[in-house]
Image (tube, rainbow, N blue to C red):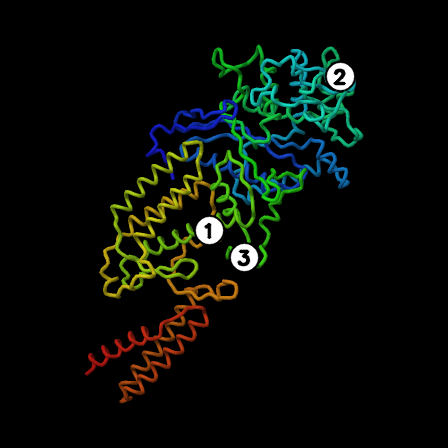
Amino acid sequence: MNFKACSPDKIFQIFNTLQKQNVLFNKNQNYLGSWYICGPTVYDEAHIGHAKTYVQFDIIRRILKMFSYEFVQAMSITDIDDKILRRSKEQNIKPWALAKMHENMFFEDMKYLNVQPPNIKLRVSEHIAYILYYIQVMINKKFAYSVPNGNVYFDSQKYKKNYGKFRNISELKINQSSYEPSFKDPYRKHPTDFALWKVDKIYDQDEYDSKVFDASKMMIHNNNTLTNSSLYGRPGWHIECSVMSNLVFGPRMDIHSGGRDLIFPHHENELAQCSCFYEGGDMRHLEDGKDYEMADIWMHTGHLNNSNDNRKMSKSLKNFMTLKDFFAPLDRSQRHANKIESYNSDHFRMMCLLNHYRKDLTFDLDVTMNKSVSLLNRIDNFLFQSNVYAHTAGQGENHKIFDNHGNMSYCCPIDEVHLEEILAKTILEVDSHLRNDFDTPCVMQALTKLIDEYDKNVNVNSSNPIPSISDIVFYSRSPFVVAKLRYFVENLLLDLGFNFSGMKRHQLTVHETKYETNDSEILSQALTKESSVEILLNFRNNVRSALLDSQQDISLENLKEKLLKHCDSLRQTMTDLGVDIKLLEMVARIFYIILSHYNINT
């Protein structure tokens, strides 16, 4: 669904975390922009908190594409890290083998979630030489210092006037243990100084990949500012993103994104490093008198909190759920409540759409997912029924519509003008919500109201009298406006990244379906085309034979007995297959055929 027709300005109001307010994003038509996203540290499986961040950014990326804004997206892959080294030692596996295994698992998870892959993957292990060069430049500019043990630190006091753009440092209780508790060094000058290069560690140097040493040895260390011991270290976490993002996009990019937990200190430190690296150098795209901001928009997602402790899901707290566990088959009680055997990527994406990307979400498996499943079922029934409506025009009494739970309704006259007005209003509302900092919860509310109006106009309530066949035949119906509603809803969801897993939106067979009462499981699916044709052909042949026999002086009573026997047989066959046939209606039709036959031949 392209919104260019109803959005002549295409201006987006997007919240910029750095400026703490909405800013205008208004580029030329068919704009191709730059987007850097902080990716995973690949030492373990991804959990649903990670997935929320990447799915919500995928939704935003797709929304921008709907307005003809496309992006080259680069993602960092942290494959050198203390956590990787610890885990590799625990599992007795090479750190790079561990990192590669979990990187592959991460992108497989993203593929299942229908998250578009980044255009560029930036692995830290492949950029060591660039990182060391970047560090050397900052040392030369006096914004970084090396210490006797080989570690290198960013000098926050030298940069003090600009440090704390994301968060007011004076409001923080900063000390050496709280700021960077996993890495203590008596040579560090100030608690807010952070590591650019780490050497002090408990691991032997032969645990490092040879390419790290090779890249380090290739560097020319002017004035011995990088000591020989620095050759056997690894980069700090913050420096890697500054270097890799600048390497790809230069000093300025359109969007820089990550989870809210990265705002401080990670993105604070990224911005500080880049500001120092480019000071007095290449600051293109920077207006006179304006502070360097590295990105036009800093974008952050809210946390996914565990309902048990209301704290952010994290591996350190051990309060997370892996994607593998989330998509595992549900137990019987959960299947009964949700009428599904397991959750899928569409259920998860709906959960993300119902929560604004900047807000935290407290996750409870039953409560949170029931809401998502319920809305998806509602949409599925709308797409299914509207599809049947549009494809069965002019078929008289066959205008029965069944939702995916077997509930029946009849098509009725519609107020075309009203539905056209509601559709136009909904399109404008959706357009406005999308351009207002990607307000997807309001978008889903607008779609729900549209479906409500469809239900009011198209379906006869089950409490109303069932219309007669003659009434249905002469109903004035217009499938065009219904098809337009369906087109809008379906294509909007496709544009937002749904793949309609397990949904029946294209099913056209109209039938009554019986369900078991024990666990709401379907007794049988609808008849296949081949089997239904064969059964009905056999029934027709039996009826034809009975009618032909009637011409051989067979009494009307005997003919009636034969026809009823064939009807009973057909009804039983269809019932066994899960299709309920109303015997009296069928008998009435057969006797109508008989009377017509006798009238013609007498």
- x then y, percent, for residue 190: 70, 17
Which residue is tagged 1? 374
Q: Earlier in the sequence, mark 3 or mark 2?
A: 2
In this view, the mark in front (1 or 2): 1
Horizontal side of residue 1 vs 371, given as left or right = left
Work out whether 584 lies above or below 226.
Answer: below
Q: Residue at x 38, y 42 (%)?
A: 446
Tag 1: amino acid: Ser
Query: Which circle marks residue 335 in the picture?
Result: 3
Horizontal side of residue 325 vs 482, given as left or right = right
Q: Are marks 1 and 2 in contact (CB under 8 Å)?
A: no
Tag 2: amino acid: Val
Quadrant of res 81:
top right
Quadrant of res 308:
top right
Which residue is tagged 2? 147
Query: Which circle marks residue 315 in the picture?
Result: none
Work out whether 588 lies above or below 344.
Answer: below
CA distance for labels 1 and 3: 13 Å
- x then y, percent, for residue 452: 35, 49
Which element type, helix, strand or loop, lies under badge 3?
helix
Q: Earlier in the sequence, mark 1 or mark 2?
A: 2
Most foreground residue, 480 or 347 = 347
